[in-house]
């Protein structure tokens, strides 16, 4: 996409962004993300870490979705 194109013309063009590239990735995870991560952690019998950043929580959710079959 060139700079002259309107990103709204391609709303899914950057929908999948690597969490390491998020500008807010270092912020604490949101309540919704924490709730979902807690649920996945319980289902996978894995430890829940409530101190994860947004980016780290997203990565952990991806891992646990694979373990629990929720990511398919």
Image: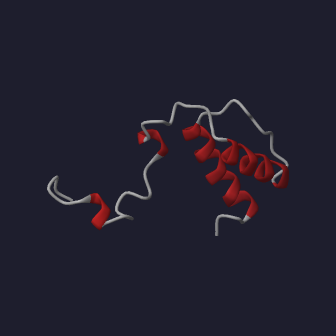
Q: Which residue is drawn at 80% across and 39% down?
A: 47
Side of 44 relative to 32 (left or right):
right
Q: Which residue is drawn at 80% across and 52% down?
A: 39
Q: In this view, does 2 lie above or below 58?
A: below
Q: Considering depth in this image, is 63 or 57 the residue closer to the camera? A: 57
Q: Considering depth in this image, is 11 or 15 the residue closer to the camera? A: 11
Q: Residue at x 85, y 49 (%)?
A: 45
- Horizontal and vertical percent position of residue 50: 73, 34
Q: In which quarter of the image is the C terminus?
A: bottom right
Looking at the picture, the colour scheme in use is secondary structure
- Horizontal and vertical percent position of residue 40: 77, 53
Q: Quadrant of the N terminus?
A: bottom left
Q: Considering depth in this image, is 3 or 60 the residue closer to the camera? A: 3
Q: Quadrant of residue 54?
A: top right
Q: Is residue 30 above or below residue 36?
A: above
Q: In which quarter of the image is residue 65?
A: bottom right
Side of 32 relative to 3 (left or right):
right
Q: Residue at x 70, y 65 (%)?
A: 70
Q: How many marks?
A: 0
- Horizontal and vertical percent position of residue 58: 59, 46
Instruction: Farthest residue to the bottom: give it.
Output: 72
């Amino acid at each position: 996409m060139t700079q002259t194109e309107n990103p709204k013309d391609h709303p899914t063009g950057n929908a999948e962004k690597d969490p390491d590239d998020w500008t807010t990735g270092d912020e604490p995870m949101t309540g919704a993300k924490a709730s979902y991560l807690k649920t996945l952690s319980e289902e996978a019998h894995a430890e829940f870490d409530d101190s994860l950043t947004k980016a780290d929580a997203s990565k952990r959710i991806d891992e646990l979705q694979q373990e629990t079959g929720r990511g398919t």
